[in-house]
Image: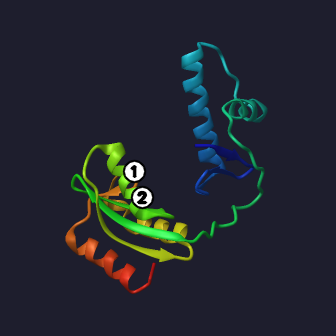
Amino acid sequence: MSYRLGRQFLIDDFGYAVGRTEAIEFAIEILNRYKDISGGEIEVHNIELDQYFARKNASFEVRDSAPEPKVRGGYVYLMFSNGLYKIGISSDPMRRRKEIERASGRPVQMIAYTWARDAWSRERTLHNHFSGFRREGEWFALDQEQVDSIVEWFEEGEA
């Protein structure tokens, strides 16, 4: 995962941005972890933050305003494994299912998927809508009614 530290935002590989205050808090947390590991003292200055992240192969982009939204076609999918549902995006959802199954060592069932011109935005909409049910990463504890509503959304081409 790389981050670009701008004047106003910290932006991850997926285009998610957090405000300057959160970006500085995050950077200080990373620096403190590095300090704990190295045993050295680190002063917190933007130049040192830039150098620290550069050493970690992170990329930087200075921005004065919010990043342009990503628009990328792909599939938005809903999978089930071990009592939880995964809402994600992929260019090949069946390949992604196999990757998750291989990595987890557990069976993964594809519930539904649909093509979306702006898959990233549609995935984010679902994540935000069901944020109260998030358990870990992109995995959610959904009931059958919620699952049915996502499947219906996919079938109606609303994704």
Badge 2 crowding class, 10 Å Cα cut-off, few under 14, some 14 to 19, many 20 or more, is: few
CB under 8 Å between discs 1 and 2: yes
Q: Residue 14's quadrant in the figure?
A: bottom right
Is residue 135 rendered to the left or right of residue 6? left
Quadrant the N terminus occupies = top right
Image quarter of residue 17: bottom right
Residue visible at 47% across and 67% down in the picture: 123
**Residue 136 in view here:** no
Q: Is residue 63 left or right of residue 81?
A: right
Q: Secondary structure at mark 1?
A: helix
Q: Position of residue 110 (x, y in %)?
A: 31, 65
> Mark 1 — residue?
99
Quick one: label 1, few (<14), some, or many (20+) residues within 10 Å?
Answer: few
Task: Determine which residue is flagged by label 2.
Answer: 95
Residue at the spot x=34%, y=61% of the render? 132
Q: How many marks?
A: 2
Residue 107 appears anywhere in the view? yes
Residue 118 picture location, percent across and down? 56, 73
CA gap between label 1 and label 2 equals: 6 Å
Position of residue 10 in the picture relative to residue 109 (left or right): right
Q: Residue furthest top?
A: 39
Q: Vertically, is 60 above or below 54?
A: below
Element under disc 2 = helix
> Can you tell which quarter of the image residue 76 is in?
bottom left
Say which of 14 and 129 sits in front.
Answer: 14
> Is 53 placed above or below 130 here?
above
User: In the image, what residue type sits under mark 1?
Assistant: Glu
Q: Percent x, y for residue 49? A: 71, 33
Q: How are the colours assigned in the image?
A: rainbow
Q: Residue at x 42, y 57 (%)?
A: 96
Report the residue at 62% width, 36% height from top. Answer: 27
Task: Please state which amino acid type lies under the numbered disc 2.
Answer: Arg
